[in-house]
Image (cartoon, rainbow, N blue to C red):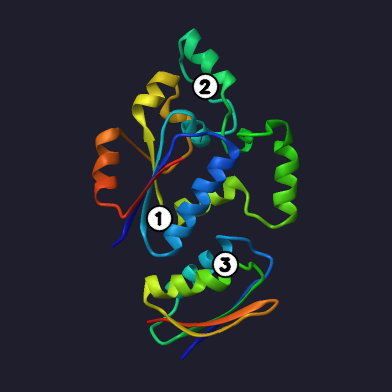
Amino acid sequence: MAVKEIDARGLQCPGPIVEVFKAINALKPGDEIRIQVTDRGFLEDVKTWCRKTGNVLVSLEDGQPIKAVIRKK
Amino acid sequence: MTKNAIIMFSGDFDKAMAGMIIANGAAAMGNEVTVFFTFWGLNLLRKPGKVKVKKTTMDAMFGSMMPRGPEKAKLSKMTWATGQMKKTMKRKHVQEITELMTQAQAMGVKFIACTMSMDVMGIQKEELIDGLEFAGVATYIGTADESTITLFI
């Protein structure tokens, strides 16, 4: 399993979600993305993004930055 | 695949930002996104430099008075503060309008220029950016009909 680290700190909407999308396309099923984001909207956006795209939100940690782990379906 | 259709009627900077953020966001959700640029919105597709094409006097006049490309677009309110708003956005790391448009196209968002508006405004294909399709209302309706979201901006 590959893990792709993304530092999206400082990026504003829709930057972080665009980064997640680009990264997931380059991965294989089961691979994971670990991302750090400072845009507050991401906390809700990442949930919706995973629900709509069918990828798995493994963990989501609120803070500065917000940290999320997403697994490709 | 989920489809989304956006009509970009306005050429105002703030509305273009909204339209392009939504287009990029929708593409990032894995949706098939089409943006129809019509009327004032057509100016967002213009190349920044002057392009040599044959025009009538009226078309040339219109062309020279309208903004060439998104960098020339102004806020819909407080137009005098456009420069200040852009500086603030830059400081806060908001992506720039041209970058959002390029990124949208790179993510597969389809840009369609309305040919009737082009004719009315005297804008020719050569004056517009690359990667466009050219069509009319039937194409929009055809796409909007199959879309889950359709917006008029």
Q: On the rendered structure, is B25 left or right of A11?
A: left
- Type of amino acid under label 3: Pro
Residue A14 placed where, x, y %? 55, 60
Labels 3 and 2 touching (C-beta < 8 A): no
Which residue occupies 46% across, 91% down? A1
Q: Extreme top residue here?
A: B57
Q: Secondary structure at mark 3?
A: helix
Question: What distance separates the C-alpha of mark 3 from that of mark 2?
Answer: 40 Å
Is A26 situated above or below B117? below
Residue indicated by mark 2? B52
> B125 or B59, which lies in front?
B59
Amino acid type for the residue under numbered disc 2: Lys
Residue located 59% across and 39% down the image: B13
Q: Which residue is mark 1?
A: B108
Judged by depth in the image, the label closer to the viewer, 3 or 2, is 3
Q: What chain does badge 2 belong to?
A: B
Depicted A25 relative to depicted A67: above or below: above
Residue A59 to residue A11: above or below:
below
Q: Residues within 10 Å of mark 1 (few under 14, many from 20)?
A: some
B36 left or right, relative to A65: left
Judge by depth and name the residue closer to the eye, B107 or B33.
B33
Query: Do pointers 3 and 2 mark residues of a single chain?
Result: no
Q: Earlier in the sequence, mark 2 or mark 1?
A: 2
Residue tagged 3: A16
Q: Position of residue B78 (x, y in %)?
A: 69, 33
Q: Residue at x 63, y 80 (%)?
A: A62
Q: Residues within 10 Å of mark 3 (few under 14, many from 20)?
A: many
Residue B76 marker: none
Q: CA distance from mark 2 to mark 1?
A: 29 Å
Local packing at callout 2 (Cα closer than 10 Å; few below 14, some 14-19, many 20+) is: few
Q: Is residue B1 left or right of residue B112?
A: left
